[in-house]
Image (cartoon, helix red, strand yellow):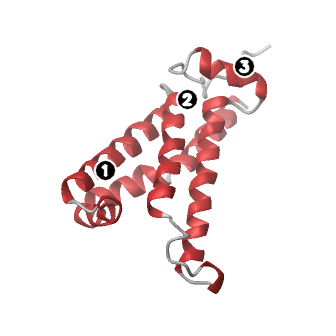
């Protein structure tokens, strides 16, 4: 049963980061010019857009790797939750097109906006744990691992 437990623990984390590593990160690398163009929608200048994309790449690769390996995973998940929130607010502005109630682009963006925040919730479960009693663990040592692949000792 330990092998199944490890597979489920890893698979759950993989599902959370799969959007970012490899897919979003790879898309930013392969289509860097297009990614910068999308970032320019938020900052309107090339240099800050390039910085945003490079920061995004660093977050997506680095934090995803930490979450998968369990190294500094709670802090990494906290950063990823913030990243999901910020990207939702910058690029999923469902209110901007003004066509939400008529079923246009605003409605499409709304679902993407909610998905970003749902992902943030999943990352916050890694950060804080699944119950009120585990929240203090993060504040006591935010850089500590949650030890996701630790299995109980046989009795």
Q: Secondary structure beneath disc 1? A: helix
Which residue bears the numbered disc 2?
74
Question: Mark 3: few, some, or many residues within 10 Å (few <14, many ≥20)?
Answer: few
Q: Where, by quadrant of the figure, is residue 110 drawn? A: bottom right
Towards the viewer: 25 or 3: 25
Residue 104 is situated, as x and y percent measured from the top left of the image, at 56, 83
Residue 112 is situated, as x and y percent measured from the top left of the image, at 56, 65
Question: Mark 1: few, some, or many residues within 10 Å (few <14, many ≥20)?
Answer: some
In 3D space, how far apart are the residues under numbered discs 1 and 3 (Cα atoms)?
42 Å
Single out the mark in the foreground, 1 or 3. 1
Q: Secondary structure beneath disc 2? A: helix
Asked whether residue 24 is in view, the answer is yes
* Tag shown at residue 52: 1
Question: Mark 2: few, some, or many residues within 10 Å (few <14, many ≥20)?
Answer: many
Q: Where, by quadrant of the figure, is residue 39 drawn? A: bottom left
In 3D space, how far apart are the residues under numbered discs 1 and 2 (Cα atoms)?
23 Å
Single out the mark in the foreground, 3 or 2. 2
State the residue at coordinates (55%, 29%): 74
Which residue bears the numbered disc 3?
152
State the residue at coordinates (58%, 42%): 13
Asked whether residue 12 is in view, the answer is no
Q: Which comes before the other along the chain, label 3 or label 2?
A: 2
Image quadrant for the C terminus?
top right
In 3D space, how far apart are the residues under numbered discs 3 and 2 (Cα atoms)?
20 Å
């Amino acid at each position: 049963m330990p092998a199944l437990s490890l597979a489920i623990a890893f698979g759950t984390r993989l599902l959370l980061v799969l959007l970012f590593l490899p897919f979003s990160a790879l898309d930013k690398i392969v289509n860097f010019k297009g990614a910068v163009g999308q970032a320019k929608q938020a900052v309107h200048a090339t240099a800050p857009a390039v910085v945003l994309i490079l920061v995004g790449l660093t977050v997506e690769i680095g934090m995803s790797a930490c979450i998968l390996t369990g190294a500094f995973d709670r802090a990494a998940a906290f950063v990823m939750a913030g990243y999901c929130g910020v990207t939702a607010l910058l690029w999923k502005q469902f209110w901007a097109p003004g066509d939400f109630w008529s079923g246009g682009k605003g409605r499409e963006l709304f679902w993407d906006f909610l998905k970003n925040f749902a992902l943030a919730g999943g990352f916050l479960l890694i950060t804080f744990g699944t119950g009120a009693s585990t929240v203090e663990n993060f504040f006591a040592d935010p850089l500590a691992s949650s030890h996701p692949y630790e299995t109980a000792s046989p009795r």
